[in-house]
Amino acid sequence: MIIPRGRTILVKPDPEQDRVSESGIVTPDSVELERKAIGTVIALSSWRKLWAFFGSPVRVGAKVLYGVYVGESAVDTKTKEEFKLLYVSFNKDNEVLAFIR
C-alpha cells in the first residue's frame, strides 16, 4: 500500500481516452505537449485535517484534473497498479489544476 506524506495526495489515473477519432484519424502523442489527465483521489496525507479545516475540496473519491507530466509515478508492488503522487498546497504551486464535481 502506498501512503502519501507531507502535502501530497495519491491519485489513480483514469484510463486514457482513445486517441483515434470516430472517423479513424489517429492523433499522435507529439501533437499535445500539454496534455491533461483526470484521476480519482485514493488517499490523503496527514495534512487532510488542515485541508478540511480550510474547506479545501481535497477528499478521497474526488476527481482531479492534472498535467500528465507532473507529480511522481508510483506502482503498488502487490497489485501492480499505477498511481500518481501529486503536491497540493494553498497557493499557486499546486500540481492539481482543478477539482471536478
Image (cartoon, rainbow, N blue to C red):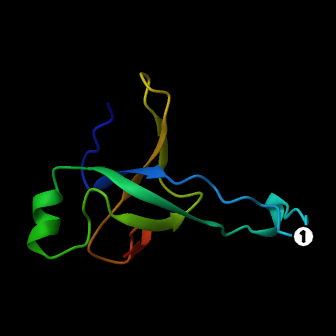
In the rendered structure, which amino acid carries the disc numbered 1? Ser
- The answer to whether 74 appears left or right of 48 in the picture is right
Q: Quadrant location of residue 89?
A: bottom left
Percent of width and height locating residue 60: 26, 56
Residue 59 percent across, percent down from the top left = 24, 62
Q: Residues within 10 Å of mark 1 (few under 14, many from 20)?
A: few
Residue located 91% across and 64% down the image: 24
Work out which quarter of the rendered image holds the N terminus and state it: top left
| Residue 57 horizontal/vertical position (percent) | 25, 72
Name the side, left or right, on which 90 lies relative to 13.
left
Residue 3 appears in which quarter of the rendering?
A: top left
Q: Is residue 46 left or right of residue 23?
A: left
State whether residue 10 is above or below residue 91: above
The x, y position of residue 51, in whole percent, is 17, 67
Residue matched to label 1: 23
Residue depicted at 50% across the width and 28% down the height: 80
Q: How many marks?
A: 1
| Residue at x 75% of width, y 69% of height | 32
